[in-house]
Amino acid sequence: MSRTSRDAAPAAKPGPSAAPAAADGPQIQLIPASVEGALDAAEEAVDLLLDSGRAPGDVLVITTGEQHPWATHELSFGEASYWAQHDAGDDVFYTDAQVADRAKARPVVVVAVNGGPESVTATALKAAHSRAGALLIVCGDPQRINSVLGAGV
């Protein structure tokens, strides 16, 4: 089965590695970034996805450390409003790894490995892998990510 161009994202930075898609899972793309740069790398990936024609509602972003500023802002209006935006599914949705299991599947999931304990990263990557329909993009330290990915994602 060949993938359409809609199922692929252009590389956000030179040299990312991509694993071939398994028959029952998403394509995995790794974008190397420091803990401090993982959120910026995730933002660049989202911008490229949107610029290449992905619908905003196709994208879920999960952070393992500090929350994305959008999530922090939206949560200031209350959890009900925040999750209502998720359920509407018409925009990019940003969530924290600790509540990512509540998020529904989307065609593309972007994970910013921007801190947090390794157990949170492992949980986030497993949740992201199970929720990504076509593409899972992981932004962070390749050694840390590969050690977690090698542990059963």
Image (cartoon, rainbow, N blue to C red):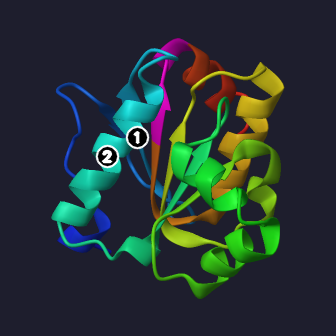
Name the residue beneath numbered marker 2: 45
Write the residue at 71% across / 31% down: 121
| Residue 35 shown in magenta | no
In the image: residue 111, left or right of residue 125: left
- Residue 107 placement (x, y as % from top left): 47, 71
70, above or below 35, in the image: below
* Residue 78, x across and y down, in percent: 78, 66
Q: Quadrant of the N terminus?
A: bottom left
Identify residue type, mark 2: Ala
Label 1 sits on a secondary structure element that is helix
Q: Which residue is label 1 attached to?
A: 42
The answer, for residue 9, to whether it is visible in the render is no
The segment highlighted magenta reads: 138-143
Q: Residue furthest front?
A: 77
Q: Nearer the viewer, residue 35 or 132?
A: 35
Left or right, residue 115 beside residue 51: right
The spot of residue 4 in percent (x, y) is 22, 74
- The part of the image, by quadrant, that contains residue 134 is bottom left
Q: How far apart are labels 1 and 2 at the CA level?
A: 5 Å
Q: Closer to the camera, 1 or 46?
A: 46
Report the residue at 53% width, 52% height from top.
70
Q: Is residue 67 above or below residue 6?
A: above
At x 80% / y 53%, what residue is drawn?
A: 99
Q: Secondary structure at mark 2?
A: helix
The kind of residue on which mark 1 rests is Ala
Assess disc 2: are there few (<14), some (14-19) or many (≥20) residues with their C-alpha within 10 Å of its C-alpha: many
Q: Are marks 1 and 2 in contact (CB under 8 Å)?
A: yes
* Residue 99 visible from this viewpoint: yes
Residue 21, image x and y in percent? 43, 55
The residue at 45%/27% (across/down) is: 38
